[in-house]
Each structure stands twice: as structure tokens, then as C-alpha cells.
Image (cartoon, rainbow, N blue to C red):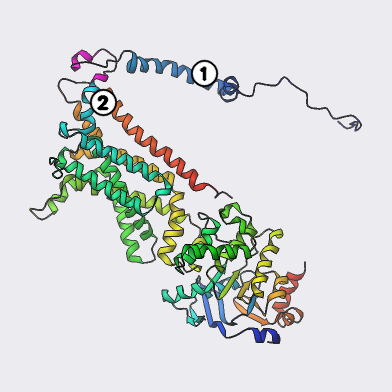
Amino acid sequence: MADIDVTQELPLPVERPRPVTSGPLAWLRANLFNNIPNTILTLIALYLLAVTIPPVIRWALVDAIWHADSGRACHTGGACWAFIAEKGRFILFGRFPYEEHWRPLSVVVIFIAVILASCDRRLWGRWLALLWLAGIAAVGVLMRGGILGMSYVEPELWNGLPLTLILSVVGMIFAFPLAIVLALGRRSELPAVRAICVGYIELIRGVPAITLLFMASVMLPLLLPTGMTIDKLLRAQVAIIMFAAAYLAEIIRGGLQAIPRGQYEAADSLGLGYWRRTRLIVLPQALAMVIPPLVNNFISSFKNTSLVSIISLFDLLGAANAALTDANWQGFYMEAYVFTAAIYFTFCFFMSRYSQMLEREFNRGRQR
Amino acid sequence: MTDTAAETRVGEPIIELHHVDKWFGEFHVLRDINLEVKKGERVVVCGPSGSGKSTMIRCINRLEEHQQGQIIVAGIELTSDLKNIEAIRREVGMVFQQFNLFPHLTVLQNLTLAPIWVRKLPRKEAEETARLYLERVRIPEQADKYPGQLSGGQQQRVAIARSLCMKPEIMLFDEPTSALDPEMIKEVLDVMIELAREGMTMVCVTHEMGFARTVADTMVFMDRGEIVERGPPQEFFANPKSDRTKLFLSQILAH
């Protein structure tokens, strides 16, 4: 290497035959077969898929039975979707009077519509809060009835998907502001406020959700003066709100702690004061920062509402379990759970995608 | 004060610190500080790091609390009374070393936030004022960007404009150029010099001695929590009295 002839031209990069840089083949080579370990992993994955996918397809589609009069004709080894055809409405709406099913259906539609409207950030503001209030009022009226010519339906019969949505959505809507108050309170300079918030959060977090639900359904009535009753659904709802709020508060506190001190100082130096500083500067940044864990919590509390079946409230999963007890249609656990799982998944997947979109939007133009 | 021009230009005292003491735990960070700043006066505070100069100006708008003595700003005494603190903060603008712009808001929103929420200006008026000040700090075209999209110098000019939008009586600068790349320091200093020419009352903690010579009416030198020396810049630079001042100036002017 010592004597390089500087007059010699440097070798130009050799023109090799150009590798395929696009198309499915190139993608395969670049992503799945680019080295030996990867190739082995790819082959193992392909083998596992080959072993598992065909039986699932055979069960769910090929051998499946779509129409049957009773469960006895349905036990052929394939999926019995006839069970879902027969019991789907029961799983969705439970024991709500059959001819009134349009009411819980409207409730589900209202929830989805209001949630979709809330997804548009341009609509965030005062009238969205009003929309929510109106939506929840409409949900209450539709479920309860007793006015506008609708028959009264007792809360015991509010089952299935509407119950799951009521418990989780209403739960989140009330838990969220409560959580913000708790998180701010935990960071308050007033010792009494701080102690109350810390005590609340630690107490609730230290107790399983089931315990809270039991206390709400069994112990609370004992503590109330005789003659006074609070509806069981309402008690469960309050327990869910209290439980979710404690967890959300800790997530929000994490966001609050991540706000640099300079932000507080800048807000102070402009004379914003505590409340405006919190509302305009601190919370928007803190909440944007904790979107992923917030949504994670929303998803898990959405699914956790199925715990209410323990105090015999029939949510979506509870109604599915109840559907399985029909003597004519016994043993279709897979079908019932695949059906409910698909419904849960749809909602949770939507939440997860939406959170990713929000994160992108909040981060736009903020990277340094 | 030997500068007769300054004598006629400056007016009544607007900031008064009497016998101010402050401790961080055991550490005596401010020792018997006495300072008077008159309306229209430009005070530059310098001193080695840890000398308490930042702490002192942060006491003027109560970002730090003093434990002894008296601070009177724009005729209002700083006590733990929140009303007084907020009244003073409305009159005192502050520019920070780290800019501290609100990253979730656009430049224009950064500028209009306090005028709208604190001064209760209509949005339109606040935006007009904001655009005016953006023009004065020479970045009118950045109004709709987010702070993270701007250079450090641009961010600091936005921060200055943000304070000015509140039409403060006094501007405090806490090492406004220390976090900037060298090539951006001048653009910020130019804005500050212009502000000084317009008669703004300024208290500025900085190591930019060229800037100090240009705009200061009074130089204040702090060391170990005390005000060691003060005086008009010509005298201060040419003929420092204290040994500590001489040492500091020789270090900072050496290169």
C-alpha cells in the first residue's frame, strides 16, 4: 500500500448488474431472507402458519354450519355459526325486551357516533361537551324508557354491549376529569389537598377492582340508611369511575412531572396564574405526552368492565355466558367467545389506531 | 451618575431592593442586596457563575422568594400576596436563558396567549400587536410555525416579542444569549439594543460586555451573593475599584 501511483486514476465503482430493488421478490429478499438466522426464522414461521392456519380456516369456514334449527344438528366438528345467528341478538342485548331491541341498538349507534365526533380535534370544545351530555341523556332515556311512549325497562335488564359501553365510556368520561383533579392535587403545595389525593390514589390502587365492585354491590347497601337504595348499576358505575380515576391520575401525574420547570416559570412571568397556567400550558403538554399510557388504560378499563358479571350485571361477556346456558344450544363456547372477542377487538383496535394518529398529530412540528 | 444624558432620561425609581437576603437551604445566595433601578434605566448585572445574579433578578418577579428585606416593583411591594405578585408580573417581562417558549403552541399563539387571557384583549387586537412585535424582532414570516421549527436565535427573539406583547414597564433578561450558538448572539443583541434605545427599563444579566458598554447606564458586579461594585460603564470598565471586579473583568475580557 506504500507506493500508490497518484497519477493512476482511482478505480470507478464497478457497474454490477443492478439488483432488483423493488417488487415483492426484492422485498422478500430484503426483509425475510437477508441472512441465515432470518431465513431460519422465516422458515419456522412459515411452518407454524402452515400447521395452524388451515385447521382454523377449515373450522371457521369450510366445515362451518350457518343454518340450523337447534344445537343438536350443529355438532359436526366445524364452527356452528347458526348459534350466533340464533343467539347473537341475545349476546348483544341480553334480556332487554326483544321487541324493544331498537332501543339498545340506538344506544350503541349513539355511542359510536359521539365517539367518532370526538375524534375530530377541530370539534374539541364546549359544544362537544354538550354533545356528550345530550348523548348520555339520550342513552339514559332510551334504556330506561317510561316516557315518550317507551315502556319502562328496569336496569337489571340493561345487558350486553350497551351495558359494556355505558360502564366503560361513562366511566372514562367521569374518571378522566376526576383523575386530572387528583393528579394536580397530588402535586399541590397545600398539604391537606396533597394528603387527600395521595390517600385516595394509594387506597384505590391497593385494592383489586373486584373488591371495589363487591363493596359497591354488597357493602354499600348495608351502610346506607334503611329504605334508601341506590341502583346496582349506578353503584357499579361509581366503583368503576373511582377505580379508573386512581390509575389515570398516576398516568397524568407522570405527564405533569415531565413538564420542564421553565414552562412554569415562563407562564408565571407572563402573569398567567395557577389555573390558566395549568389549563393552557401544563395540561395540554402533559396530556399529549401520556397519550399512549392513557389509551392503554382506556383499553384495559374497557375490557375490565366484564368484571361486573361478578355482581351479576350482564355485560357483553356476561350475556355471552348466559347465552351458553340454553339447553337447546349447549357447548358452543368457541363460537360465543370468538364473537364477543371480535366485538371487543374492534373497539380496542380502533382506540389503539386513534391514539397513534393523535400522537402523530400532537408531535407534528414539535421535534427539534 | 456622571452620564448627564442618562440623568435626564431616567425617571422615578421603579425597582427597589432594600436589604434583601436569601438562602437556598444553608447557602446564603443573596447578602444584603440594595439596588435601585429608575424608570428608563438600563442596568447590566455581571459576575462569576454562582454569584447570585440570576437569583437576584428572578426575585424581582418572584420566581424566587426572598426571605428578608423589601422588594418594591412599580410601586407594589412583593409579599406572599398572590394579587400583588400577579400585578407585578403583568408589568415585568422576562426573557430566559432557555427561551421557555410553549412548544405546543405556534409562535403567534405564544405571543397572544397572555394578552388574551391576562390582559383580556380581543383576539384580533392581540394578533395585530403580536405581528407588530414579530416584525420588530424581524421574524414576521415565522408566525405560524412551532417553536421547535425555529433556530435558537429565532426562538429567543420570539421570547422577547412574547414578553413585549404584554406591554411591560420593565424587561428582565436572564443570560439571554448564553444558550445560543455564537452566530446567533448578534441577532438577539441587536433586538435588545433597539429595545434599549426606545427607552425600556431593562435589567440584564449577561456576559456580553460589548453589549453592556453599548447600552448600560449602570453596571452592577456581583460576587458570592453580594453587590461588590456598581457604576456607569465607562468608569466600571476603565477603572474598577474592587480587586474582585478587576479579576473578573480581566478574565472575561482576556479573550
Residue at x 29% of width, y 30% of height: A340
Residue at x 48% of width, y 65% of height: B114
Dot 2 amino acid type: Ala
- Residue to which mark 1 is pinned: A43
Chain that bears disc 2: A
Q: Nearer the viewer, residue A270 or A286?
A: A270
Quarter of the image that includes the N terminus of chain A: top right
Residues marked 1 and 2 touching at CB (< 8 Å):
no
Q: Position of residue A89 (x, y in %)?
A: 22, 29
For residue A92, above or below residue B101: above
Image quarter of residue B160: bottom right
Q: Is residue A325 magenta?
A: no
Callout 2: SS: helix
Q: Within 10 angstroms of label 1, few (less than 14), some, or many (20 or more) residues?
A: some
Q: Earlier in the sequence, mark 1 or mark 2?
A: 1
Left or right side of A125 for B31 = right
Residue at x 67% of width, y 71% of height: B194
Chain that bears disc 1: A
Q: Position of residue A292 (x, y in %)?
A: 43, 44
Q: Which mark is residue A336?
A: 2
Q: Position of residue A60 (x, y in %)?
A: 33, 18
Q: Nearer the viewer, residue B188 or B144?
A: B144
Q: Nearer the viewer, residue A138 or A75?
A: A138
Dot 1 amino acid type: Leu
Which span of residues is magenta-colored?
A69-82
| Residues beneath discs 1 and 2 located on the same chain | yes
Q: Is residue B125 visible?
A: yes
Q: Which mark is residue A216?
A: none
